[in-house]
């Protein structure tokens, strides 16, 4: 059996706003990523994907606060650890993160190599600059980045180069889990493909042991990750293999996401193209019952009355709906 | 490097063009003032003389000496030639003293007053601004309103308030001059103490005014930088907060350095108000006297000093900035 690199149990985190309102942007989320595997997380903007990414690292800054749940990285439970221990022994080393805005993720007045020195010195104190340079040079070579990048300032790099440089820095310390938050959404299609290829390369070359890939375009995950999790209003609404979630989704929201984007990839052409009307709920006052009921075309009166649990199926498959799988499939058959 | 050379040459040529224009204006403008300063000197010299031809002769002699009988264009070339030889001529209002002598005596007062005041104001202001941004909360709520209030004071307002409260009311400090009027400059403790005491009000009036503006600028720059995406990324790569704060304040500081260099460059102009109100014997006060006495060699020379300082400060900032801040360097490439 493969080793589990990251396991999250019922993690809940919240934002506390200036007006003391609680926003539960991650609501009892559980997930598991095994060695050599990748997990995709999809959902519209505002569904809590970025917040989940930040919460997974166990290091919280206001306004984000930990509420409950556990995070276990390669068998080590980090939920109760001191923040400074998390910083020193977990961040960047066990779990690394590529922020959504990787374009601006580098300090504009610092050369790339100097930032790399800071990153390594934050975790290992007795490394010389020469050793660091050599390590960085080797890594950049493996990843096909020019060595001259090291001596440059971020502003001297193109968007795609900046993105790839950030990815390279994130894997400097060979993390067990790499979280990439929408690593491609600000880029043109060609660069997007290059970035995705680079991330898959990282797995193949064993520079990272597992990966979480976040996007708002569910179809993009097909062929990129092994498993997919769909999020809505801070909750998981569907989980399964990429194949299952992309071609055979159970939850009406996941189906809606598949239909809402035109992707000229093979096998996806025959998917009916319909955008989901409406917007996700405001998490300051989430509705009672099913969060998606407001926008669901299969909604029933009882949907808004009771809270809905995640239903676990065999093989790690799960979905959050009061209807049974058969009832849903029947509804889809009838249009 | 090639690009940077081009940038440098571009800035240098602008520096020279601006300098020539300013130099010409510095010469012409004071001389367009109505009135005849030579006549004023002559009437001073010829007091009690009743002989009209005698007065006329003295007048002739002085216009010859100052060159005011020649056409303006010719005067200009003589002036250029003299300036190139470091000769600024005689002061009209304090005749027998040369302009170089008058300015040489006053410029040190200005530099010693302004330079420390600007630096101290800048340091205090930036520290307060950075702390307000970082600590937020109560500190921010107290510091910021005060800073905004104080920075909106006109310079003369602050000088007069200090003068009234600490000079006239509490009588803690003298209200005018650079040292006691009954003393002769020397290195005795008595004299030095007198200088220190006279220094306080003009000094703090300048410091207080600049603190507010600096604090406000630094605070908003720091808040902007603290929320930048690179801060988040650096944190989640496990870099220590102390180090990240270093990045943030360095970046927030860069624009503030421009402000510092500019206030050093405009120091003499900035000195005017405080020096005039406290009759401080610096360049500003001298310039004011020059204007009152229609002393155009003195005015031209003072404004020339101001011009050179402002232009050089700007020039140096632009050149250094291009080196320090890679963002500017990249922008030059376009
Ligand atoms: N700093 C913050 N303070 C308060 N609420 C926030 C903050 N950041 C995000 N949120 C809220 O959390 C929810 C999830 O946001 P986010 O995780 O960014 O979603 P996604 O990445 O899926 O677009 C949104 O409703 C958003 O309004
Ligand atoms: Mg996001």
Image: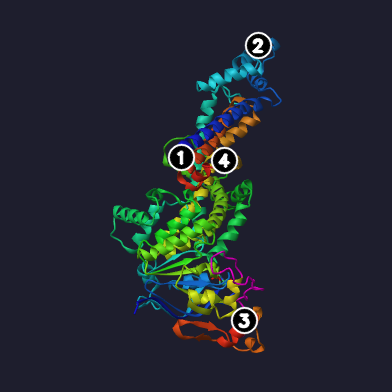
Q: Where is mark 1, residue-wise? A: B191
Between A282 and B251, the one nearer to me in the picture: A282
Quadrant assignment for the C terminus of chain B = top right
Instruction: Identify the image quadrant of residue B49.
Output: top right
User: Which chain is home to disc 3?
Assistant: A
Between A60 and A204, the one nearer to me in the picture: A204
> Which residues make up the magenta segment?
A260-289
Q: For the residue labelled by badge 4, is the local secondary structure a helix, a strand or a loop?
A: helix
In the image, is residue B269 part of the stretch drawn in magenta?
no
Q: Where is mark 2, residue-wise? A: B57
Question: What is the total number of numbered labels drawn onto the structure image?
Answer: 4
- Do marks 4 and 1 both belong to one polypeptide chain? yes
- Do marks 2 and 3 both belong to one polypeptide chain? no
Whole-number angstrom distance, CA of label 1 to CA of label 2 = 45 Å
User: Which chain is home to disc 4?
Assistant: B
Whole-number angstrom distance, CA of label 2 to CA of label 3 = 116 Å
């Amino acid at each position: 059996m493969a080793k589990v690199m990251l396991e999250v149990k019922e993690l809940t985190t919240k934002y506390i706003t200036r007006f003391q309102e609680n926003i539960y942007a991650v609501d009892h989320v559980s997930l598991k990523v095994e060695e050599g595997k990748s997990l995709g997380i999809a959902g519209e903007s505002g569904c809590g994907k970025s917040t989940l990414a930040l919460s997974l690292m166990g290091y919280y800054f206001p306004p984000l606060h930990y509420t409950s749940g556990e995070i276990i990285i390669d068998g080590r439970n980090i939920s109760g650890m001191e923040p400074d221990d998390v910083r020193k022994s977990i961040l960047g080393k066990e779990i690394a993160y590529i922020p959504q805005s990787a374009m601006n993720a580098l300090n504009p007045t610092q050369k790339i190599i100097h930032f790399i020195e800071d990153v390594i010195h934050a975790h290992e104190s007795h490394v010389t600059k020469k050793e660091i340079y050599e390590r960085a040079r080797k890594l950049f070579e493996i990843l096909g980045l020019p060595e001259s990048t090291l001596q440059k300032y971020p502003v001297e790099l193109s968007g795609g180069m900046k993105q790839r440089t950030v990815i390279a820095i994130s894997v400097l310390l060979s993390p067990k889990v790499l979280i990439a938050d929408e690593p491609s959404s600000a880029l043109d299609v060609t660069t997007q493909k290059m970035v995705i290829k680079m991330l898959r390369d990282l797995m193949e070359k064993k520079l990272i042991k597992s990966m979480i890939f976040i996007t708002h375009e569910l179809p993009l995950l097909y062929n990129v990750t092994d498993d997919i999790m769909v999020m809505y209003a801070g909750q998981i609404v569907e989980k399964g293999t990429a194949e299952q979630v992309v071609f055979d989704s159970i939850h009406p929201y996941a189906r809606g996401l598949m239909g809402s984007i035109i992707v000229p990839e093979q096998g996806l052409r025959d998917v009916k193209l319909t955008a989901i009307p409406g917007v996700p709920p405001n998490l300051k006052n989430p509705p009672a019952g099913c969060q998606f009921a407001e926008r669901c075309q299969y909604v029933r009166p009882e949907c808004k009355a009771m809270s809905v649990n995640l239903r676990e199926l065999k093989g790690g498959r799960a979905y959050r709906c009061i209807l049974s799988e058969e009832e849903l499939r029947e509804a889809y058959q009838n249009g | 490097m090639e690009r940077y050379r081009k940038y440098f040459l571009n800035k240098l040529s602008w520096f020279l063009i601006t300098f020539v224009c300013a130099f010409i204006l510095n010469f012409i403008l004071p001389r367009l003032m109505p009135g005849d300063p030579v006549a004023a000197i002559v009437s001073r010299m010829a007091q009690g003389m009743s002989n009209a031809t005698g007065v006329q002769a003295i007048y002739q002699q002085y216009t010859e000496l100052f060159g005011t009988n020649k056409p303006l264009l010719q005067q200009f070339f003589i002036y250029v030639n003299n300036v190139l030889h470091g000769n600024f001529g005689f002061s009209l209002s304090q005749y027998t003293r040369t302009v170089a002598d008058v300015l040489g005596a006053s410029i040190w007062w200005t530099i010693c007053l302004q330079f420390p005041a600007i630096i101290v104001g800048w340091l205090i202001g930036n520290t307060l601004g950075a702390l307000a941004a970082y600590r937020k909360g109560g500190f921010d709520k107290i510091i910021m309103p005060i800073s905004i209030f104080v920075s909106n004071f006109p310079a003369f307002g602050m000088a007069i308030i200090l003068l009234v409260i600490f000079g006239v009311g509490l009588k803690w400090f003298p209200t005018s001059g650079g040292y006691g009027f009954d003393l002769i400059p020397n290195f005795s403790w008595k004299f030095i103490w007198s200088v220190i005491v006279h220094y306080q009000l003009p000094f703090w009036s300048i410091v207080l005014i600049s603190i507010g503006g600096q604090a406000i600028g630094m605070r908003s720059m720091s808040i902007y930088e603290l929320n930048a995406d690179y801060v988040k990324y650096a944190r989640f790569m496990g870099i220590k907060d102390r180090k990240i704060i270093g990045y943030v304040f360095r970046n927030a500081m860069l624009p503030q350095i421009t402000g510092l260099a500019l206030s050093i460059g405009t120091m003499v102009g900035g000195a005017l108000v405080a020096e005039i109100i406290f009759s401080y014997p610096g360049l500003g006060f001298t310039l004011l006297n020059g204007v009152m006495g229609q002393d155009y060699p003195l005015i031209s020379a003072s404004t020339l000093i101001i011009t050179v300082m402002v232009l050089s400060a700007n020039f140096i900032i632009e050149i250094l900035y291009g080196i320090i801040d890679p963002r500017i360097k990249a922008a030059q490439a376009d």
